[in-house]
Amino acid sequence: MRLDKYLADCGIGTRSEVKEIVRKGRVSMNGTVVKDSGAAVSEADSVSVDGKALGGVGELAKKHWFMLNKPAGTVSANSDVRDATVIDIFKSEGLKGLFTVGRLDKDTEGLLLVCDDGELSHYLLAPSRSVEKTYFARVSGRLAPDAAERLSGGIEFKDFVSRPAKLEILGEDGDNDTCEALVTVCEGRFHEVKRLLAAVGGDVTYLKRIAFGPLKLDAQLKPGEYRALTDAEIRELKAAVGK
């Protein structure tokens, strides 16, 4: 890692500001003043600014990943003037830079990944990677007999044509025109699952994400609870995007 990037990631300043700090001889590496902002910093090096030691490169590079069972009523944002946010739930962790991997609607529950790993998050959300997300839905209204076929072929909306989606009916109540279903999509369009089911005759009354790529929602997590991902789970996410 370059010295200027390392210092910027430590919060010392912007890349241009830390270059000036280095130029003025305020930075030492392994006890020696360094004036080259492009110098390489490894996990074996100790760096200090104005005599104050900074955290190690290995510690800085460590990424944090969490699985949250998102409760209804919270918004997938870092801050909001009206509603509680997903990131509010993680305040006790004392971590900076956490964000949600994609979004869930305010009234939608279930599996939401939260991390500070921009690179892997980008790949997980990239349409070209086709990472699947599966939702459990309760639906009112009578779905079209060919609903599954139509979703698999893509639905044309005014603003986009959906990519192929999977529909599995779990159970139907013909007397009340309701059903329960699993819907699997591989993109993250706004209100996509609700719009897909509306296009084939259904009105979603409850929605919960139960899987994201290779990960399934931990059954032990109650709404509002979360846990750190295991190393094995992070490897699974990386494998899902070919990393």
Image (cartoon, helix red, strand yellow):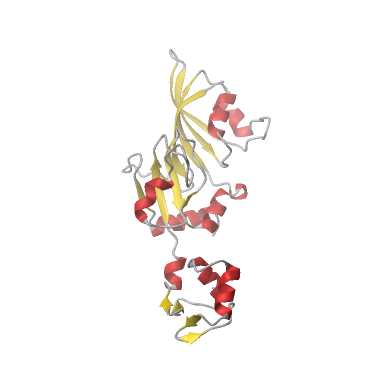
Numbered circles on residues, count: 0
Residue 121 in sight from this viewpoint: yes
Q: Is residue 188 above or below residue 151?
A: below
> What residue is drawn where x is 60% and y is 33%?
152
Where is residue 142 shown, x and y percent of the image?
52, 18
- Residue that sits furthest to the right in the current view: 158
- Residue that sits furthest to the bottom in the current view: 32
Where is residue 138 shown, x and y percent of the image?
44, 26
- Residue that sits furthest to the top in the current view: 175
> What residue is drawn where x is 63% and y is 33%?
153
- Residue that sits furthest to the left in the current view: 220
Residue 2 in sight from this viewpoint: no
Please name whichever residue, 221 or 116, is drawn nearer the observer in this view of the structure.
Answer: 116
Please name whichever residue, 224 or 30, is drawn nearer the observer in this view of the structure.
Answer: 30
Q: Position of 14 compared to 94: left or right?
A: right
Where is residue 3 shown, x and y percent of the image?
54, 75
Please name whichever residue, 24 or 189, is drawn nearer the observer in this view of the structure.
Answer: 24
Where is residue 79 shown, x and y percent of the image?
47, 45
For the C terminus, give its image quadrant. bottom right
Q: Is residue 47 above or below residue 95?
A: below
For the N terminus, give its image quadrant. bottom right
Q: Is residue 153 above or below residue 231?
A: above
> What residue is drawn where x is 43% and y is 73%?
54
Please name whichever residue, 173 or 28, is drawn nearer the observer in this view of the structure.
Answer: 28
